[in-house]
Amino acid sequence: MTVSPPRDTGPTPARHSYPAAPRSGPVEVLHGQPVADPYRWLEDPQDPATAVWSAAQDLLYAGEEARWADREALRGRMAELLGGGGSGPPVARGGREFHVRRDPGRELSVLAVREGGRTRVLVDPLEADPSGTTVLDAWEPSWEGGLVAVQLSSGGTEHSLLRVLDAVTGEVVDGPVDRVRRSPVAWLPKGRAFYYVRRLPPERAGGAARHRRVYLHEVGTPADRDTEIFGAGRSETQYYTVATSPDGRLLVIGANEGTAPRTDLWTADLTVTGPDRPGLRRFQHGTDARTAVRLRTGGGPLLLRTTAGAPRGRIAAARPDAPGPGHWRTLVGEQPGTVLQDFAVLDGPALDRPLLVVVRTRHAVGEMTLHDARSGAPAGTVTLPGRGSVTGLTVRQAPGHEAWFAYADHITPTTVLHYDAVTGQLRPWAGGPAAAAPAAGVKVTQEVVRSRDGTAVRMFVMSPEGRPGRPRPAVLTGYGGFGASMSPGFTPQAVPWVRAGGVYAVACVRGGGEEGDEWHRAGRREHKLNTFEDFDAAADHLLQARWAAPGRLGVLGSSNGGLLAAAALTRRPETYAAVVCAAPLLDMVRYELSGMGASWRDEYGSAEDPAEFVRLLAYSPYHRVREGTCYPAVLLAVFDGDTRVDPAHARKMCAALQWAGTGDGPVVLRTERGVGHGTRGASRSARLYADVMAFLAHHLGLDLTKDGLA
């Protein structure tokens, strides 16, 4: 119910001149409580008033940017750090090794094929679009390696077009298929057909076009003739996964309600009914747990990675027709203090026994162990290069004894490693670009912080000396949502910061997955306050332990981490000297109504529920902005192609802070066009990193032209 627009009392006296932004939005009564939304008009990017306001904000940002003395030098340094190239682990199919790679100096990653010791490019997005706004979203080779399904999108939208290419010639043999978004692709043998996920056309989805279905597509036929397999009558916010065994016998379909930490699974024996009418049986249904299946050729039990009965994860074996977790046999049990991330099977004839390669994290740091694939008994460890992360574990489709994975840590760019279970050797993969050396002059430690309720929270700290020798300009970042872990990964923006004498810290707060499923649940929905209090404790620790200098502590967060950073800003503005929020969620009363917000209800709760509305409103940063408050310098960075988090969040927050604040620091909006929430070119990434860190350096008093190794 709308009762009236708020009274415009005129601008608060401020130290900066900002573009005019009338406070003309409504006051709505929600669940009996009046809620003001003075900048509702900024939600519409097509409104001429929004366009005028945005253009004025661009000029304001340009003027602020020109004041950063370190900006150009830092952009060059970021380009160097990001320009070394890299590769993803190969997917071996039919004698070919498919992989994504970006060679040194290249702007975007390409899809490449390694065969007979030689590498060739199969898909280069820059050939299709020299402007650099088209990116490779996803790809999946057929089981025999003769075809590959690729998905590309433009302008940052992540609305992909799917095409099927000949893996030898690169010619398009099928497609394009529209209305896909990083869809899983599950091939049937001989490349004749595949299952995939596609959104309904708007006329069938009531205009929302969020409803998804699983389809069977026969290669070479029009997509409008595809057979609908699964999804009818289900929620519009459900996401589906689909997988097949290499022999084409077994189909597995998974369903998740938005980003909820639970999975429903169905299986079907395709030899009984045929691929176009699979007899789906419930495999896991109504269980509050995440489960993923590893499919292999040759029958036998399914191997599962699941949190059912094990919040930190276990590996289980089950018959394909098993009716739920009560019928699964634990193969490798939950291990205290660690979180199961992934596993793969090595069962080649050169091995004495089949092995499981198991990846876990301990307080977010990766570990790799070996187990007997039949009994689950420990069979050894694989020593990693450092305290980093293991991602993208792959093995051969056929029985083999090799595994590939990506490794990175805070100061080491991602490299692909090859493990040989016969020799026990771990080496860089011969098919990837040369591995880059760790960045010099940066030491990484892990601190333990006590949150308000006594919970131990881990925090990585990057510094020049590895100890709090003297208080320094410091940046704190975190995420705390969706069970995503802030595991060690190459952090290029931290390298020049630390080498110039600063401190860069990463807090592993509740809501993430660093300590397993329970850690995630302890920071979501009704427990979201824990996330913010953990972050407060991390900031206090940096100051009290003399890592950070008083008045020189900044905050940086992106996406859900942008919500975290903005919550820190509005909860304790006096604690920070500068805050950066990139692609942030900020209006938590209306987050469900734009972007992909509707699919996040399980994470945050819904404003349609009276109790959840009260909690959302209580921490919603946009609604916590208070007139006359001395806010620090704030940079809000958004991307106009972002289809996940609507840039309107940042526009509205920017106007509110500019109206309310009385601090010395400016509030500016950085709008980048032609990109979105996800993949972007190397030069755009370098520019974004440089601009963010130059802003922080300017307002925290760090001279980034200095280099501790020079």
Image (cartoon, helix red, strand yellow):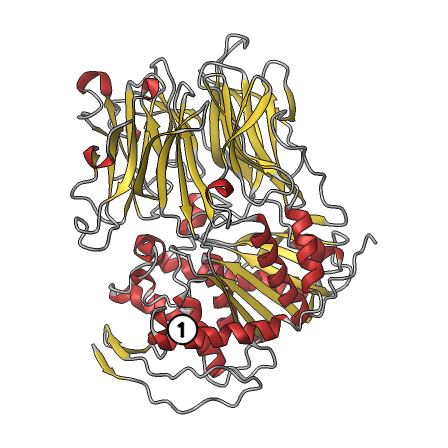
Q: Which residue is mark 1?
A: 51
Q: Is residue 83 left or right of residue 605?
A: right
Quadrant where the N terminus sits is bottom left
Depth check: 641 or 184 in front?
Answer: 641
Q: Quadrant of residue 401?
A: top right
Which quadrant is the C terminus positioned in? Answer: bottom right
As displayed, is residue 516 above or below residue 295? below
Direction from residue 662 to residue 500 in the image, left or right: right
Going 20% across and 55% down the picture, which residue do you hit? 207
Residue for point 33% across, 28% down: 186
Q: Is residue 308 visible?
A: no
Task: Confirm whether residue 699 shows in the render.
Answer: yes
Where residue 524 sits in the image (x, y, percent)? 39, 55
Amino acid carrying mark 1 in the image: Ala
Viewer-side residue, 161 vs 624: 161
Q: Could you classify mark 1 by the number of other residues whose Cα lies within 10 Å: few (under 14), some (14-19), or many (20 or more)?
A: some
For label 1, the SS is helix
Kindly identify the residue that appears in the image at 66 percent across and 25 percent down: 427
Q: Is residue 619 above or below residue 190?
A: below
Q: Is 415 or 372 nearer to us in this picture?
A: 415
Question: x, y (%) of residue 359?
Answer: 52, 31
- Residue 95: x and y in percent read 49, 16
Residue ranking furthest to the right: 710
Q: How many numbered marks appear?
A: 1
Percent x, y of residue 470:
77, 63
Compared to 217, does 134 lie above or below?
below
Task: Tell me: residue 506, above or below residue 178.
Answer: below
